Amino acid sequence: MESAKEAAAARGSPQAAYDPSISEHSAPVEEGGGFVAVAAFGFDPQGHPVQVLSYSNGRWAPVKGLPPPRDPGTLDHPDSLYLVYDSTTVLVGHVTEGLPDFLIPFAGAGCGKGPIVSRVGGSWRYIPFTGPFPTTEVLGGNPQFVGRTLVSDNACAAIVPRAQRRSWTWKYDPATGDFVGTEHVGWPRIPFPVAGSDGA
């Protein structure tokens, strides 16, 4: 129902930069005696294409609407998200302070990316990533939850020489409110198998 409303509102809108019919959502996650979920839409006329929903007393209700995350170096589309064109779901992990964290998959040129939405610190927000590059709210490099860890890699090119293969483990720093990345040599065998390589 919500997807249909957003798609209808987007027809003819110059702000609907990406496909308004595409949406993604997480499974419900138990939290604080109720359930929460995150949904993302290709377009939202109010400029909040990411919605946090809460379930209690037999009904779902929005609790927070978020604008698109900051991603330096990309065009600013205040009402649109470039979502994946299939049945991709918003992924759920626990990598901050025990609360559920939601990874929203974005489409990319041969490389997965996306922001993390969490209520860590008391309010729903995107958690920034810091490292040897500009701070951003979108992590590239095929981000994945692995157990209670968030990892990424540089397996985005068709062929990456063994000596240049890298992966990163991201840990939440409560002092700064950011994810901080630690670089590792090589690609992990799981969850990033690369076609034509031995995965080492």
Image (cartoon, rainbow, N blue to C red):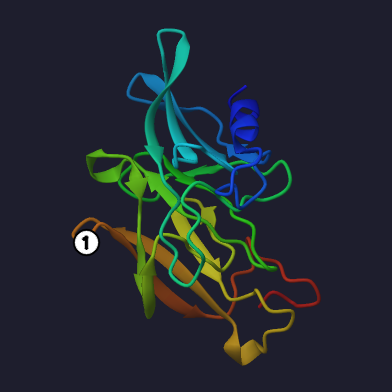
Image point (45%, 64%), residue name: 71
What is the three-letter code of the residue carrying label 1?
Thr
Q: Which residue is mark 1?
A: 176
Residue depicted at 46% across the width and 35% down the height: 51
Q: Position of residue 60 (x, y in %)?
A: 47, 18
> Is residue 178 shown above or below 37?
below
Horizontal and vertical percent for residue 50?
Answer: 47, 40
Check the picture and name the quadrant holding the C terminus. Answer: bottom right
Q: Is residue 181 above or below residue 112?
A: below
**Left/right of residue 188 with respect to residue 79 in the rendered view:** right
Residue at left offset 44%, top offset 40%? 48
| Secondary structure state at the residue bearing disc 1 | loop
Q: Relative to the observer, which residue lies in front, 151 or 189?
A: 151
* Camera-nearest residue between 56 and 41: 41
Q: Position of residue 97 (x, y in %)?
A: 30, 46
Rendered image quadrant of residue 199? bottom right
Locate residue 197, reporting x and y percent. Answer: 76, 78
Instruction: Locate the N terminus by quadrant.
Output: top right
The residue lying toward the viewer, choosing from 67 and 121, is 67
Residue 174 versus residue 189 in the image, above or below = above
Which residue is outermost to the top? Answer: 57
Pick whichever, 76 or 180, lies toward us. Answer: 76
